Structures are given as structure tokens and as C-alpha cells.
Image: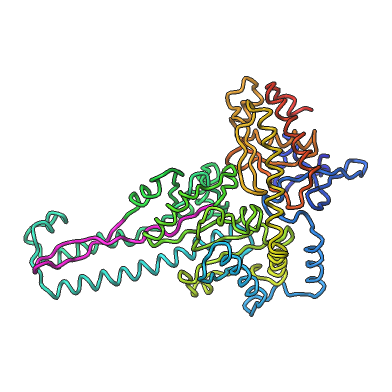
Amino acid sequence: MTASNTEVDLSEPHMRGMLASVGLDVEYVRGVGDILFYRTDNGIEVPVLDLVGGYGCLVFGHNHPALVEKARQLLADQVPIHAQFSFHPYANSLAIELNSVIQRELKVEEPYTALFGNSGAEAVEIAMKHAELDRGTRISDLQAHVVEAWRAAENLAPFIGSDVYDRLGLPNSAGFDQVARTVQRANEVSLSRGPVFLALEGGFHGKLAGSVQMTHNPGYRTPFSRLATQARFIAIKPGAVQAALAAERMEVILPEIIDGALRLTGMAVPRIAGFFVEPIQGEGGIKVLDPDFADEIRSAADAGGFPVIVDEIQSGMGRTGKFFAAAHIGLIGDYILLAKGIGGGIAKSSVAMIRSSRYNGQFELLHSSTFAKDAFSVNLGLSVVRMLEANGGGAYAQAEERGAALRAEFESVRAQYPDVVSDVRGLGLMLGFELKDLSNSADPILSQNAAQGIIGYVFAGYLLREYGVRIFPTASNPHTLRAEPSINLSDSAIAQVGEALRGLCVLLRKGDGAALLTG
């Protein structure tokens, strides 16, 4: 079961050691549907039920025959992988089909422009850059307005009241030029401040230099906080969004002439570049966003003039019973990010969809990606979307039905072990099975691994070794095991999962941490 030894391990050896410590250093040699296979030392293939599903990539499972055949056809046809800076009609076709789904599920008639990338984190980076380009344009427009306003005020030769001097800390002898220069310096400070993105506590949006700053978990973010854009993380509770907007509010000072006298007024500076939202927090513990809170986010963005960036990288592509998880909660994004499942488990691809009223065509000259928008990955993406949409969206109904069956099994285990299982949540085939916090367990193995945040991987190693079930915890909520299998998950597989989780619960009820590690 353990991967074969090599003379020197130079490929992420630290990670290999961690995997080995909990029994997850397995070399899988084949995958089909929801099954992965590894070989024993004598060459016998052993099946493993895979509920990880490529962290949401495998809505149709490993190596789906139709997608494998499409990939073979594309390669046999010698489609160009590298034909950058040329016309890509297949990319336009995919953008049109995605727009059709947006119009149906989200009821948005305005078209979205597609920008392609290679990964979910790159889609996030695209969104960040485009949003800052848009904010920069608004800043420039505001700068021009401020200059014109003060020029017009000077021409009116206004009387300067004592309240102006008091506000600016100037002597009453100061003339209009000194007042204007003082205000200009203050305005320059306000206008030069960098952007702030809003994101939710518990959110995960990637681990690149920019995207990691949108990820709430400080373990991922803090070591690189000096590299990138600032984010403000908002608790998911009523009023939190408005409080964040108030805290980030900045103004420029404008002149207002009333009865020949100079008064000072303020105008908001567009400090917030965008608001990142997952309809279902994946790495945060499979938590579905409340529709009322989603409405609060949408209303705040409309009032503040900044975009809502909906991250569907893990939740999208039909897994929840709809193409977009946001459709379940009525959240309309100005940007919609897709990746993972859009490659069908074969290609590496992503797309950022941007509402046309917010789209800046100049961005296409400022951002490029060597492997993006190639004929292989995009045509596979087209096949995935068409498979999801076929038969009146039969795949969505299947995801909903299979998800309900798996959830019922999870709930059955929870009912049997209420002292061990804390919660079952999610939508469709994006489910979380949360075990109670073991940080204060009397068993030192359980308490220490829980305190170190790796208890979920201890669970995973046990379930793999004893039951042939592959399931991992969410990255920022280690007591939550997440299930993201394919829409073809069988009843026998669901029964196998139930048996495995019951076996785990028996040991946790006993407080037997040693059995999790030793078998």
C-alpha cells in the first residue's frame, strides 16, 4: 500500500513524511469513476472508494469514458495547445454556453465576458487584477473631478469661513491657495491608498501570492502578508458588512460654495476593490451561505459601487444540484469564477466571467497566461458543460438525488453517535461530516493531533487503511470530513462509507487514538 521507496526523495519530502505518518503515502496507479487503485508489493490492484473527488474536480468521476474519448480525439486531431495571440472560436462557444446557464439559473440577461486561466487560484488573481484596474479607473475619474471642482471654486473667489480654518488647522490669515494646497495634500493621501478586498471569515480563495491574502486561515496567509493586497475578513452575522464598509470609508475633500462662502464637503473614495464570496465555503467546513446574508452583501456592493466576486471554483459545475451553487441562495455575482470541474478531471483550466457593464477590455492587453484558452482544455470544458446540460439537466437531478442518499447515510451515523458527530451539512454532492472537537480529549493521541490541526488526516489514514475509503478533512476545519464524489456514486459505495464512519465513531466514542494509527 505504501509507495515504493526511492534512493533519494527530492519531491516535497516534508509532505511525504507527513503523509507517511498517518498512512496516506499511497501511490495510486489507476482511477475509474469513484474508484482509485493502488498495487500491493506483489502487483495486485486494490480498489479504494474516492470521496475526495479531486477536491471537487470530478463531477463525472475519474476518467469518464466520454471525456477520455474526447481527449483522445482532440489529441489525434492535433489541436494546437500553443496558438497564443490568435482567434479561439471554441473559447467563445464555451463563453456563450456558460452565459446561457447564467441567464437560466441566475436570471441575469446582461452578458458576461470570459477570461481563461489554468487554475482556480489564477482565476482569483485575474479577478483581483481586473477589479483593481476598474477601481484605478474610478480613482482617476475622481481625481479629475476634484481638480476641476477646486479650479471652479477658485474662480468664484469665495469668502473663507472660520469653520474651514478650524477644520484644516490653518490661521485665519491663510488665503485660498493655502487652503487648496492643504486640502490637496490630504486628498493625495486618501487617493493614494491601496485597495482593500472584502472576504468572509472561513473563506478560501487560493494560495498564490495574491489569492492567499483572500484566504482567511492565518496559517496560510500570515507568512506572506507583506507580499500582497490587504483583505478585511467579515464575520457572517447581521450588520457585519455595514460595519466593515464604515471602517474602510475614506473621503476626498471638495469645495462647496454657499452664499459666496467656501464650505468643505466630502466624497467617498473607492477604497474597496471587490467582495469575495463562496456560496458554500469548501475549505472552511462545507458551510452554505445564508440567503439573507447574501442579500446583505449584494445590497452593500450595489450601494458602494464595488463588485461581488462569486467563487464557484469548488461549488460550481453542477455538484450541488444546480450548475451554480449561488443559484440556491439567489446571489448574483458581478464576477463568477470557475475551475476544477470545468476540466472534467483531465485538463487544467479555469475561467473568470465578468459582467459586461464592469468589463474593461484593456485588461486583455495587461494579463496573459501561456497555457490558457488552448483548444484541448477549452474543448474539454465544452464537453463537460454539454454533458451537464444534456437531457434537460439530468446531471443536476442526479447530483441532487445521490447527494440526498449520501446525506441520509451521514445523518444515520450521526443519529447513532450523537456524542461523536457534531453536524452534517452541505448541498447535493458537496457535503460535510463534522466530528466533535477532540482538543480536550483524555486520549493524548486524539487531543494532540486535534491541537495540531491534523486530526482529520489521522481519521483519513484510518478510514483508508481499514475500510478502503478515501476522504479528507477541509483545510481550515480539520474536524470536518468533506465528501465530493461523482454523480454516479453507487448505493454500495454509500453503504461502504456508512460502515467506515461507524467504525471511526466506535473508536472515538472509546477514546482509542492508538487504534487510529496502528490498526
Q: Position of residue 321 (x, y in %)?
A: 65, 54
Looking at the image, which is closer to me, 411 or 142? 411
Above or below 312: residue 262 = below
Task: Single out the residue that lies furthest toward the right.
Answer: 42
* Above-or-below relation of 26 to 246: above
Q: Is residue 216 above or below residue 393?
A: above
Magenta: predominant secondary structure element? strand
**Percent from the top left, x then y, of residue 456?**
66, 36
- Residue 462 in view: yes
Q: Is residue 515 left or right of residue 366?
A: right
Q: Is residue 216 left or right of residue 416?
A: left
**Start and end of the magenta stretch?**
250-278
**Closer to the camera, 104 or 187?**
104
Can residue 14 be seen in this snapshot? no
Q: Nearer the viewer, residue 56 or 374?
A: 56
**In the visual, does 158 lie left or right of 441?**
left
- Give the quarter of the image for residue 519: top right
